[in-house]
Amino acid sequence: MKVPKERNTMESLENDVKIGKEIESDLARLLCLLATHLPKDIKKRIEEMAENENDAAAKKVYDCMLENMSLADSLARPLCQDTGIPNFYVKAGADFPLLGSLENIIKNAAARAFRDAPLRPNAVDPFTSKNTGNNEGPLAPYIDWQIVEGNEAEITAYLCGGGCSLPGFALVLTPGEGIEKAKDLIIAKVLEKGVNACPPLILGVGIGASADIAGKLSKKALLRKIGSVNADPHAAALEKELFEKVNLLRIGPSGMGGAESVLAVNVEFGVRHPATFAVALATGCWATRRATFRIGSDLKITTEDF
């Protein structure tokens, strides 16, 4: 087993605090950027859909979306009034030097972005219906952890809005119902609630042994790059089939009709129990604000999303 070097001197502790504050500041700045800019792949996809659209009403909606992106950029204002609740998906190396303090760094960065962007307060107590006023509370911001080998860290941030979550679900089917029933449920839910999620949509589909596993996989699928394809041929075929079938609904941008209704369909899966077939759907709106930030071994933050 590799024994880490001792880092318990006062000088090293002070240096860790200083570097942690620098990362916190950089991460807060990038979160503000995330609220006001779409990542390159989503922006490119919307521009392509606008270019390919022939329906007059749909083209006007796309024009509004493109103008909205331009104004948000030039004025440094959030793309949408619903700036969501920050979600973070962390993949950290076991030897990352600030692993023990990374959670506090992320939470402090989220708090700074709340003040600086500014982000709308969206954290509401489920029992009292009172807003906490600062986007903080139990599991807010939400942080999902994966510890891997190495000395670097990767943080995918997602501003999870309310409307785009409305079509989501997670449930457990019998194996006899299986994949065909899952397809029907996904299409039916998009038809029922898709307009509420500000289409065109990104659909994240998760399949696994239980509802919680499927739900987690669906959210991670939602955060994949536009144009990525699952390496498994069965999952890739499901992505293609659902993409085509949902577009046949002709929901279009903002529900105005049109050639396309989805930006992408991404599927992630795990093995299931012989007696269960769990499926979940997570949806993202046209303004899906997610980006991945990498903290290298030099403790500098970089991103390729903007």
Image: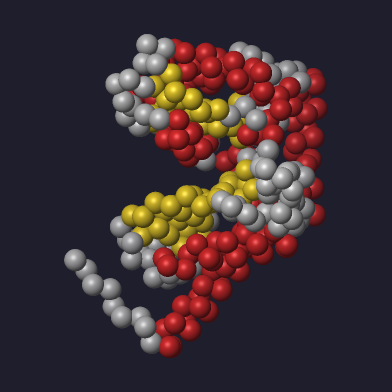
Q: What residue is at 73 percent from the left and 62 percent from the top?
A: 115
Asked if residue 229 shows in the view, the reply is no
x and y percent of residue 97 in the render?
Answer: 39, 70
Asked where in the image residue 133 lies, by quadrant, the reply is bottom right
x and y percent of residue 126 in the render?
Answer: 66, 42
x and y percent of residue 98 in the render?
Answer: 43, 69
Residue 273, compared with residue 181, is above or below; it is below
x and y percent of residue 160 in the render?
Answer: 62, 43
Residue 99, compared with residue 180, is above or below; it is below
Residue lying farthest bottom?
A: 10
Q: What residue is at 29 percent from the left and 21 percent from the top?
A: 274
Tell me: 263 left or right of 276.
Answer: right
Tell me: 15 left or right of 169.
Answer: left
Tell me: 254 left or right of 95.
Answer: right
* Tally of marks: 0
Q: Nearer the viewer, residue 16 or 240?
A: 16
Q: Nearer the viewer, residue 35 or 180?
A: 180
Q: What residue is at 46 percent from the left and 78 percent from the top?
A: 16
Q: How is the image coloured?
A: secondary structure
Residue lying farthest left?
A: 1
Tell me: 269 left or right of 23.
Answer: left
Q: What residue is at 40 percent from the left and 58 percent from the top?
A: 92
Asked if residue 167 shows in the view, the reply is yes
**Quarter placement of the N terminus:** bottom left
